[in-house]
Image: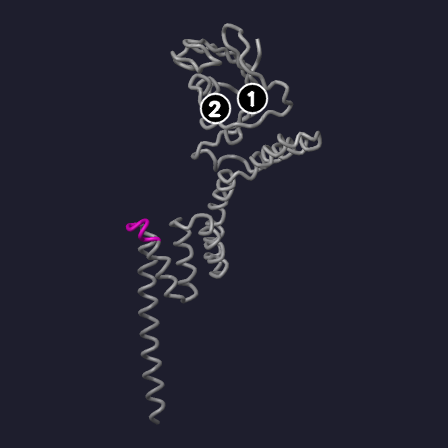
Amino acid sequence: YILFVLVFVLFQRLLIYLVSLSTLTPFETTSHLKYPRMMKLGRDVTLYGLELGLLTMKKGEFSRFLFMPKYAYGDLGCPPHIPPLAMVLYEVQVLDFLDSAQDEQNNVPLTTFLNVLDTQRSFGNLCFNKKRYEDARERYKQLVDDEEKQRLEEMKLPFLLNLSLTYLKLEKPQKALCYGQKALDINAQNTKALLRCGQACLEMSDYEKTQDYRTRAQAKKPFDPDINTLLKKLRKSRFCSVTFSIMFSTLYGASGCL
């Protein structure tokens, strides 16, 4: 009877589970690791039955799941370690979790998110101090993983867009443009960021850039009312600018004849 121990993370969903075959035949063990590697539901662990079971659990809960072959390794098993038609027993304890579903990410408190990152960093430091450099490397790498870094950047988007809009309301278009461009650095195709930049450029009478941002935004959302409003304002501003130039030229010419 040997247990298979892993730490499991779904973005910040953290679990420890113990696995053994129903025959109690030794399978595999990583139980000697004090700080097992973190894993992601649906990516690193894909056993159908285990995923279903984990989603029913609460923080601090301990459960046992006995899976029939169709919920585990199927009729063929996983030779040479798991025989055909094997029933698998999982013992699972949920230490902590944070659901990272797309529609729930914005509801995650920032303090909770930062605590998760700090915990991961602390695990890396502990491993390093114990000269377990391979484990420390894996911890630190997970913190700077490209996919996770992209998610971190994407979390900034709504704040940058709100800042850009706020500076527009405060009649500070240069600041609004700055934060709009920062949003575009994260996602160059973001329609709201393009719109904010266009609105800021219009306030600064930079009609060429306004047209550029508006065109790019409208290509994404042709019927967006805010983008169409920007187009109307741009046309009106250009008309007023041309009209003023003509009037000024006429007056200047008339005064020059005197």
Foreground of the two, 174 or 251: 174
Disc 1 and disc 2 in contact, CB within 8 angstroms: yes
* Residue at 63% from the left image edge and 22% from the top image edge: 33
Residue type, mark 1 in image: Leu
Q: Position of residue 207 (x, y in %)?
A: 37, 65
On the picture, is 71 further left or further right than 126?
A: left
Report the magenta residues as a range.
217-223
Q: Position of residue 22 (x, y in %)?
A: 49, 7
Which residue corresponds to mark 1?
A: 6
Residue 190, labelled with which disc?
none
Q: Looking at the image, is 242 positioned above or below residue 100?
A: below
Quadrant housing the C terminus: bottom left
Q: Position of residue 187 (x, y in %)?
A: 43, 48
Residue type, mark 2 in image: Val
Whether residue 220 is in magenta: the answer is yes
On the picture, is 142 further left or further right than 133?
A: left
Foreground of the two, 26 or 218: 26
Quadrant housing the N terminus: top right
SS under mark 1: strand
Foreground of the two, 176 or 97: 97
Residue 45, labelled with which disc?
2
* Residue at 47% from the left image edge and 35% from the top image edge: 105
Q: Looking at the image, is 178 positioned above or below residue 89?
A: below
C-alpha gap between disc 1 and disc 2: 10 Å
Circle 1 residues within 10 Å: few <14, some 14–19, many ≥20 = many
Whether residue 78 is in magenta: the answer is no
Foreground of the two, 83 or 103: 83
Please tell me which of labels 1 and 2 falls first in the chain: 1
Q: Looking at the image, is 160 positioned above or below residue 136?
A: below
